[in-house]
Amino acid sequence: MNAQLLIEVSALAASFLFIYGLKRMSSPVTARSGIVVAGYGMLVAVLASFLYTFGVAEAAKPHLTTNAIIAVVALLIGVGWAWRSGKTVEMTAMPQMVALYNGMGGGSAAAIAAMVLLAVPAEGASHGSLHYLVTVFGGLIGAVSLSGSLIAWAKLDGRINKTLRMTGIQAINGSIMLATIGIGLYIVFGAGGHAPAGVTVAFFALALIFGVMMTMPIGGADMPVVISLYNAFTGLAVGLEGYVLNNPALMIAGMVVGSAGTLLTLLMAKAMNRSVSNVIFSNFGAAGDEQQGEIKGSQKPAEAGDAAVNMRYASKVIIAPGYGLAVAQAQHKLYEFVKLLQDAGVEVKFAIHPVAGRMPGHMNVLLAEAGVPYDIIYDMEDINGEFKEADVAIVIGANDTVNPAARTNKSSPIYGMPILNVDHAKQVYVVKRGQGKGYSGVENELFFADNTNLVYGDAQKVMVSMIQAIKSLDGGGH
């Protein structure tokens, strides 16, 4: 089997592994094995790339060998960094890592485009306008994904705490994008794909600036959608640059990631009752000073032990987790508490909102890490009708996703957003550190409801108190 045929077979195998792996990721039960399968696909694709050193002209082999050595060194550095960071990253920092990986993928696609546009064409070699148009488009999307993902990472990680707000910012961003597109069209049609280096550098610099300017005005409430959007951007960019390199594995992987990311972005925006353009170009979740009118009622505190006893004698309890659960790293203690309730004959279920946490699936992964069985974890649309049957609903670290104002208060900025119907339960307990607002910046009407009590404190410490209360009640038999 010659090298070219082996490369093509490897690309086909890698593409199959990517698609099969993504399919398995659609279920929490098989997601882990799906990631492993896709990882093998990436390994096959990377190893196959070294086969390009065979079958080239002898004069080009020394240059290609040097590039191969550089590639091996880069791979070792990348694998070492990824292995270490993957082993040590906390669950609370997982969204930041995803944002970084999105950015690295987009940056790689932009680097490929830059290499093609800055390379000196070989004698007699030529490409059509379509080739360079795809190169420029992929480079533009990849560069925007890189800088935008880095800003998203910095916001999620608390390194950037301010949201950029200024008059005419959308007009400024539009001007930057138009200038970038104009330079890109000049590179393709005016310079035949080989513009002066300064022009090409200006094109990528403006694309990177646009990514920063587009992401800076977006508030924390919308970061899950932004991460998903940049994931789609990265996939599209990789697919386009795969076409440029005539690499079917990159094309298929890019298209699969791009389409999956786009679908997920649309689904998440729908779960917030907003369009993607509204997420990118609105002020939602940024200022924290929205007006929603006066809220009736008062916040009623409760002791953790009293709440635990009430749940111990309930028939059905539904738990609505949020990002605060991840911050407190309370998932293991929560599951210990759940098992005590189950031992006492209480039916316990988890309700997951599509945008709970700071990235898609964040809560599912968090609960899986603690060993919570998949069959008691339900998506919002599957469990919302059961809250009215629940004796107790307990909210841990969630806020905007359980705010009844989204259903009832037309003056609220989150009006129309689908929420978990926790307020329909007979009794609601909310575990939270203090009286702070959610990412949207609006007060939560649930906290003032007649059937709601607030258990103040760190979620992990609260769960420890609840566990102790149940054990004391049952005579320490568990």
Image (spheres, rainbow, N blue to C red):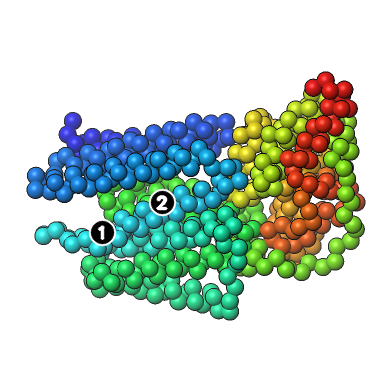
Mark 1 — residue?
Answer: 116
**Looking at the image, which is closer to me, 420 or 290?**
290
Q: Of residues 132 and 82, which is closer to you in this image?
A: 82
Where residue 232 sits in the image (x, y, percent)? 47, 53
Instruction: Classify residue 178 by image quadrant.
Output: bottom left
Q: Nearer the viewer, residue 437 or 113?
A: 437
Residue at image location 57% in from the left, 31% down from the top: 29
**Dot 1, how many residues are within 10 Å of its Cα: few (below 14), some (14-19), or many (20+)?**
some
Q: Position of residue 11 (x, y in %)?
A: 30, 39
Kind of residue indicated by mark 1: Val
Q: Which residue is depicted at the point 56% across and 35% down?
A: 27
Say above or below: 395 vs 162. Answer: above
What residue appears at the point 86 percent right and 37 percent down from the top-left corner?
305
Q: Residue at x 74, y 58 (%)?
A: 437
The image shows a total of numbered marks equal to: 2
Residue bearing mark 2 = 105
Left-right relation of 91 to 188: right
Q: In the rendered image, is residue 391 in sight?
A: no
Q: Which mark, residue 173? A: none
Residue, far bottom: 167
The reply to whether callout 2 and callout 1 are in contact (CB within 8 Å) is: no
| Element on which disc 1 rests | helix
